[in-house]
Each structure stands twice: as structure tokens, then as C-alpha cells.
Image (spheres, rainbow, N blue to C red):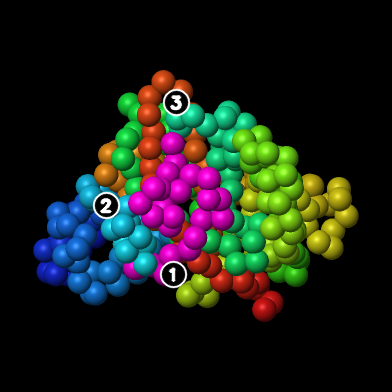
Amino acid sequence: MVGQVSVSEKMHAMFDRIKIYSHFPAEVYIDQPFPEWGDEFKEDLRALLRNHHVLILRGLELAPADQVIFTSIFGDVAKPWDNHRTHPETALVQVVSNASRKESYKSVTLHWHSDESFTSRPTEYTVLHALMVPSSGGDTLFADLHAAYRDYGEAAKRPLARLKAVHSFRLLMGPMVAARISPEAARSEEERFPDVRHPLVRTIPGTNQKAFFLNQLCVSYVEPLTATESTNLLNSLYTHCLQDMYIYSHKWRVRDTVIWDNSCLLHRVANIPANEPRVLHRTTTSGQIPQGCED
């Protein structure tokens, strides 16, 4: 469901239209160029993102350097962990493209994941800006793990508060990345990212809200459960969290800019076309050490 929301006179001067979906995302149509935005407008954007987890800006022009400045509205801009696809103008921007990429590496983004959860301080916000999009396919799907946690039965939630998920780069991420680099470089990447343990249920930064913290690419098991218990629990949680009611599918348009909160969402790409270009620029912000319900 989409509904118009009332906004201040100043917001009307900046935004052509704002749409709020039933729980996420928020969608904003821009009618002023980025450099003209003031601090109040930027805080409005931060509030929309905090409340709706995904923020879609339509019709925004962003050169690579501008995207870095834009991303800093939401936090400290992070260097990409993977420096193989950085933009020639700035190493803080990655080029996401379906051209000249091995199929095994493309398959990384087909899995539901949260960016860099295999690090001790996972990415907080990710920004994608669309330059070229196919006529069909290449959508980005988001799953709202805050809403999924909210709807989970209270009795079922209780024992999850003490559990830790082991996020392992070596589970699926490492082997897929290794398909496009040398064996020596692949070993070096694995050494850079030892296994980390994060709460299975985490607090969304800046709020008192909770969300499941999962990743099909990296979560290898849940402690202190047995292997069978861990597998059964993860399968059950993915089945619950990936119901249609929790998923938004974004069909890209040129000059779309989408920002999302990795602390409470999973995302993946669907149906990447092989015969039409899909080119986006990606930036991220640094994250915090995830805090659990009992921290």
C-alpha cells in the first residue's frame, strides 16, 4: 500500500512528492539538485531512512565525487573491502556492472545477504546509484528483518536472545570471490576475514528496535546449538523472514538512488540480464559492532 504523507512547507520546496509504503520503503521524488540541500533537508532524509529502512530517491544526478559527499550524510564513508571494482575517479565508489564478470562471482549477489557481515563492524548503510538499467530484470529485493522479528512469536523469540551466529567469509563468499582471482589472492582474502560472531538478534543502531541478523552467504552455524539444531533454526528463520509480506522488490530507473540499512535488512539481486547493461555506483558507510538483546 502506498500513501501520501504530509510534509513541511520547506520539504515541499525541495521534494516533489514523498511516498511511504506500508512498512518500507520511503520514496522521494527530487526537484532540486543535491548541492543545494540544506542541513534540515538532510536530517529529514536521515529520519526517513531510520523509520523506513530503505530510502529511494528518484531523479537524482550524482557524479562519483558527489555520491561520496551524499553518502556522508548518513555516516562515515567506508573504503570497499573489495578493491577490484573501484571507480577510476575515486576508490570510495565501486562500479557494479553485469559486463565482463564471471558467472560464479555474479552469483554472490543472488543470495540473500547483509553487506560485510563477515567483519567485526559490518556495513551500516549501502548506497546504490543507477546509471544504466535493463528494460526488464535486475531488480533488487529487500527483506525486512525488523518486521519479521516483530511478528515472530514471543515465546519463540525468548531463547534467541542469547544465541550468536558465526559469520564466515569462507562459507560461500570466499569460494565465489576466488573464482575471479588467483589462488594466492584468494588465500589472502580468507586470512583478512577470520570468522566473527554476531548476535542472532541485534539492536538497530540509533533505536531500541530489534531485528534478526542473518546472511545466507556467511552464517555458517548458530552457537551454542548442535549442528542439527543450528541448521533447523536457520532454515526456519529464513522461511519466516523471506515471506512475500516482508519483501520489497525495487525495479530500477536511471538516476534512482537507493539507500538501505544493513542492520535490519537482507537484500539480493534477481534475474540479472545478460544482454542489456546494468551499471550502478556503490558506496557504503562504516558500521558499529552489532549489539544484541542482552548487551
Determine if the magenta segment contains residue 86: yes
> What distance separates the C-alpha of mark 2 from that of mark 1?
18 Å
Please tell me the numbered disc located at residue 204.
none
Which residue is identified by label 2?
62
Which residue is identified by label 1?
76
Front-lying residue, 49 or 256: 256
Which residue is identified by label 3?
273
| Label 3 CA crowd tier, 10 Å (few <14, some 14–19, many 20+) | some
The image shows residue 224 at horizontal and vertical percentages of 84, 63
Q: Is residue 6 above or below residue 281?
A: below
> What distance separates the C-alpha of mark 1 from that of mark 3?
33 Å
Q: Is residue 66 above or below residue 132?
A: below
| Label 2 CA crowd tier, 10 Å (few <14, some 14–19, many 20+) | many
**Of the residues under marks 1 and 3, which one precedes in the sequence?**
1
Looking at this view, name the residue that lies furthest to the bottom.
Answer: 295
Nearest to the eye among marks 1 and 3: give it: 1
Residue 155 seen in this snapshot: no
Image position of 37 (left or right of 164): left
Identify the residue at horizontal 35%, vertical 60% (top origin).
68
Identify the residue at horizontal 23%, vertical 69% (top origin).
41
Nearest to the eye among marks 2 and 3: give it: 2
Residue 194 seen in this snapshot: yes
Amino acid type, mark 1: Asp
Q: Is residue 43 above or below residue 102?
A: below
Instruction: Point out the stretch of residues depicted in magenta.
Output: 73-97
Q: CB of mark 2 within 8 Å of CB of mark 1?
A: no
Which secondary structure, mark 3? loop
Amino acid type, mark 3: Pro
The image shows residue 202 at horizontal and vertical percentages of 62, 67
